[in-house]
Image: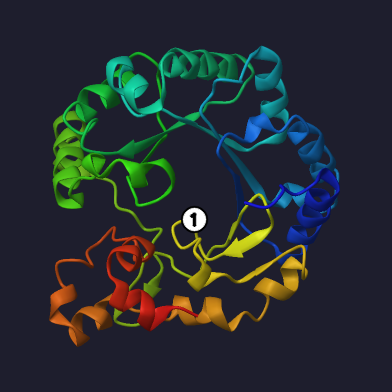
């Protein structure tokens, strides 16, 4: 990857993003706290008129969240998600020795600083058998009330570990059983975040953008591949890349229900919770058909 954006380039980008009026900006990585200027960047951002209307979310593994960092995070961010994938014997296999303990310390520091963190869990074949016990631990021992569960996808380090992939149906059953045993059948939460299309649905495709450290802009982190490049902020302004972007409108128009009707072989692929980018990576025919 090319050189990361400089502090000046990031300040310019953040100032421009205000005029696009996004509901939320999620800062993730890698580990975003590895940037030593991150607090200075967002302190300056929060002083720009209109910035406080934008929900800022920080995603971190928690290792660098000491008491001083937690205090700064609480003053700048509206939401914090700490990535933990299971109890220590599972999490540390997936995320490295000591990462579970580091995440626990981060959660404690954040709570003491006045912000209640959520926990982000990547569901995979290794942590799925003990997922219910882990969720109970988070609720009962850490008093966590905000969870973000997502399926492992063909991205980053997971590309080297195909054995960690698991069925979305199987994962859904485990999560549903846990929820109903814990809270009752009629309290199962419904995900209303998926955009509705006329007579169909998709995964939110075209409703977000993903900006990489080198300034490249893509529709999402899974579709961060050459076939779906929108542009680069080092070459043109983010407003020009996004505003009136026919490519994003084109992606928003993709209707999974219509895809299934046009090709019955896709029926077992496109289900609720399906990621279009994940399917495209596995189905070369779709990638060729829908690439820009």
Task: Please indicate whether residue 154 sits to the left or right of residue 164 in the image.
Answer: right
Residue 38 vertical position relative to residue 195 in the rendered view, above or below:
above
Extreme residue in the bottom direction: 262
The residue positioned 21% from the left and 87% from the top of the image is: 262
Q: Is residue 26 above or below residue 215?
A: above
114 w.r.t. 18: above or below:
above
To which residue does mark 1 refer? Answer: 221
Name which residue lies at 35% across and 70% down. Answer: 202
Query: x, y percentage for residue 123?
Result: 29, 39
Res 211 → quadrant: bottom right
Q: With respect to residue 153, does 19 lie above or below?
A: below
Residue at coordinates 21% horizontally, 33% vertically from top-left?
183
In front of the other: 114 or 59:
59
Q: Is residue 114 visible?
A: yes
Q: How is the image coloured?
A: rainbow
Q: Position of residue 73 (x, y in %)?
A: 67, 28
């Amino acid at each position: 990857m090319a050189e990361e954006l400089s502090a000046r380039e990031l300040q310019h980008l953040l100032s421009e993003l205000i005029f696009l009026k996004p509901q939320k900006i999620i800062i993730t990585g890698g580990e975003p706290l590895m940037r030593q200027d991150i607090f200075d960047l967002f302190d300056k951002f929060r002083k720009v008129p209109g910035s406080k209307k934008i929900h800022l979310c920080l995603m971190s593994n928690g290792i660098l969240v000491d008491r001083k960092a937690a205090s700064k995070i609480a003053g700048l961010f509206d939401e914090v998600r700490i990535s933990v994938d299971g109890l220590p014997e599972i999490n540390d296999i997936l995320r490295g020795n000591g990462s579970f303990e580091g995440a626990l310390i981060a959660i404690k520091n954040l709570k003491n600083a006045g912000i209640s963190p959520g926990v982000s869990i990547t569901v995979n074949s290794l942590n799925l058998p003990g997922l219910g016990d882990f969720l109970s631990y988070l609720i009962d021992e850490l008093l966590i009330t905000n969870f973000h569960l997502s399926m492992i996808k063909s991205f980053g380090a997971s590309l080297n570990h195909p054995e960690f992939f698991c069925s979305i149906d199987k994962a859904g059953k485990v999560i549903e059983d846990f929820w109903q045993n814990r809270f009752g059948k009629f309290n199962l939460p419904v995900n209303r975040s998926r955009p509705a299309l006329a007579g169909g649905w998709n995964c939110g495709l075209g409703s977000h953008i993903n900006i990489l450290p080198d300034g490249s802009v893509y529709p999402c982190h899974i579709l961060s591949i050459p076939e779906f490049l929108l542009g680069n902020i080092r070459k043109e302004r983010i407003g020009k890349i996004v505003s009136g972007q026919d490519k994003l409108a084109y992606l928003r128009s993709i209707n999974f229900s219509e895809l299934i009707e046009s090709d019955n072989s896709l029926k077992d692929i496109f289900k609720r919770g399906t990621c279009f980018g994940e399917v495209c990576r596995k189905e070369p025919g779709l990638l060729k058909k829908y690439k820009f």
